[in-house]
Image (spheres, helix red, strand yellow):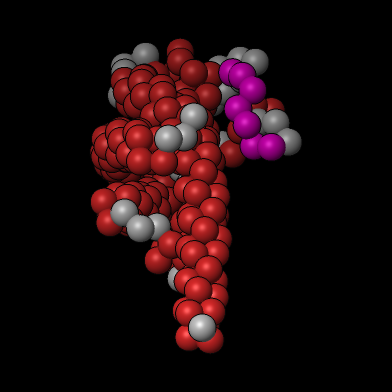
Amino acid sequence: MLFLAVTLGFFVENQREHLVEHQREKQFVQSLFNDIKADTANLDRIINARTKKENALDSLSYLMNNDSVKEFTKQIYFYAVSIARTLPYRFVANDGTIQQLKNSGAFRLIRKRSVVDSISKYDVSVRNQLGQQAVEENLIDHYRSAATKIFDALVFNPILDENAGVIGLPADNPALQPYSKRELYEWNYRLYGIKAINMANRRDLRSLLQQAKNLLIILKDEYHLE
């Protein structure tokens, strides 16, 4: 009888632990689902912003290399300050739940291997994107260095708000700095670098967005989430 009582007690305690872990698993998954859903909205916005940035880069390149460049300097200054900004195009993942799962060892609570694999792959893709954005920051720093030989920085002040957001065109056609052909060639090269990394980032962000959507479907199907 004592043996049966001990065995029964052990069984009940074990079942209780399984129930608690199952509840924690669902809580983590629901939180993760909410994080990734927020990521998809953010990714969609940034992808659209990067498409507009590419158009701005094309316009800036065309105007700067046009024979009538002096007639379009207000547009040139506007585009020049716009494309050098990074914050509107930077993806920051809502990774609080993933970090908690990784740092606390709670990944073991997620019993389905396919779900764990999908989460891990998404996390790797997010970190790869962060690396890509670091490369972009470096290229923009090089662009800014070349831009000092062409633009008057004082013109930028009135077209930026207190949060460094671009609010509009300059009032007139402000003069550009006197620059050489060599300096223009260098600036064009730096501009091309920004365009190339912007296109690469947009491509990778589209892939990441699809990956996030697929992960949402997996979590929704496996855990019957709404």
Q: Residue furthest right?
A: 162
Residue at 26% x, 51% y is 114
- Residue, x 48% and y 86% (percent of image)? 3
Res. 204 image quadrant: top left
Inspect this view and state whether residue 64 appears: no
Q: Position of residue 38 (x, y in %)?
A: 51, 36
> In this view of the protein, can residue 15 be seen by the observer?
yes
- Residue in the foreground of this view, choosing between 217 and 53: 217
Outermost residue toward the bottom? Answer: 2
Toward the viewer: 177 or 45?
Answer: 45
Q: Is residue 153 left or right of residue 212?
A: right
Between residue 92 and residue 212, name the one nearer to us. Answer: 212
| Above or below, 119 relative to 107 | above
- On screen, residue 169 versus residue 214, left or right, reads right
- Residue 59: which quarter of the image? top left
Residue 167's spot in the image, x, y percent?
64, 23
Where residue 118 sits: x, y (%)?
Answer: 30, 49
Q: Quadrant of residue 217?
A: top left
Q: Considering depth in this image, is 187 or 105 the residue closer to the camera?
A: 105
Q: Is residue 19 magenta?
A: no
Numbered label tally? 0
Residue depicted at x 53% and y 68%: 12
The prevailing secondary structure element of the residues shown in magenta is: loop
Up the image or down, 186 lies above or below 213; here it is: below
Q: Is residue 165 magenta?
A: yes
Highlighted magenta segment, given as a residue range:
163-169
Q: Residue at x 40, y 66 (%)?
A: 108
Task: Return the x and y of residue 138 as percentages of the image width and height.
Answer: 39, 54
Residue most extreme to the front: 1
